[in-house]
Image (cartoon, grey):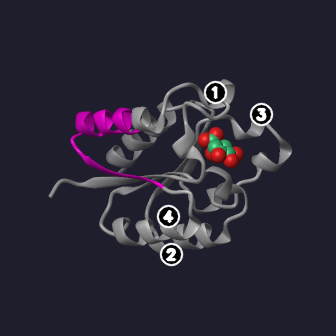
Amino acid sequence: MKQWVVVVNGPNLNLLGKREPEIYGTRTLDDLEKTVTAKAAELGIDVRFYQSNSEGEIIDFLHQHGPGSLGIVINPAALAHYSLALYDCLQALALPVVEVHISNIHAREEFRSKSVTARAARGVITGLGFAGYELALEYLTNQK
Ligand code: DQA
């Protein structure tokens, strides 16, 4: 079996393309999945791509698909700002995590600047759009 990276997107990211396009762009979640899958193919790995609007479903998916993976790329969306359950989950899995945000969370409302989940991450990429996911995949594939 090929090595894999888990790529998870949180609440409301199913609305990509329609939701505040001036902030999140006009490309859809399907476009994101295609971008991520193409990058994974280039890197010679598999990707397990998931989106949910439910905190519990995201945690269940991570419990199921995290162990054995090269690591986790996660855009927790608003969960980043308050979900201690997701933070605990990422800590418990003890895998390399890269947190990604499409927009620059530090250039927006004050409440977005704080991420409780980022503490469980190796690094955070914020504001680079879909490229953030590709960079995160590269990092997790090539980490020493
Ligand atoms: C987001 C930023 C969050 O503050 C917001 O709640 C999102 C998307 C981003 O990708 O820029 O839903 O994570």
The image shows a total of numbered marks equal to 4
Disc 1 marks which residue?
21
Nearest to viewer (mark 2 / mark 1): 1
Identity of the amino acid at label 1? Pro
Which mark is on residue 107? 3
Q: Nearer the viewer, residue 117 or 142?
A: 117
Nearest to viewer (mark 1 / mark 4): 1
Mark 1 neighbour density, 10 Å: few (under 14) some (14–19) many (20 or more):
few
Q: How far apart are marks 1 and 4 (CA)?
A: 24 Å
User: In the rendered image, which quarter contains the N terminus?
Assistant: bottom left
Identity of the amino acid at label 2? Ala
Nearest to viewer (mark 3 / mark 4): 4
Disc 4 marks which residue?
58
Q: Distance between the residues labelled 2 and 3?
A: 30 Å
Which mark is on residue 92? 2
Quarter location, residue 117: bottom right
- Mark closest to the chain's N terminus, 2 or 4: 4
- Mark closest to the chain's N terminus, 3 or 4: 4
Relative image position of residue 9 (x, y in whole percent): 51, 50
The magenta stretch spans residue 84:
no
Nearest to viewer (mark 2 / mark 4): 4
What kind of element bears circle 2?
A: helix
Relative image position of residue 106 (x, y in whole percent): 75, 39
Quarter location, residue 19: top right
Nearest to viewer (mark 1 / mark 3): 1
Relative image position of residue 120 (x, y in whole percent): 58, 62
Q: Give me the residue at 50% from left, 75% from top.
A: 92
What kind of element bears circle 4?
A: helix
Q: Give the range drawn in magenta.
A: 33-51
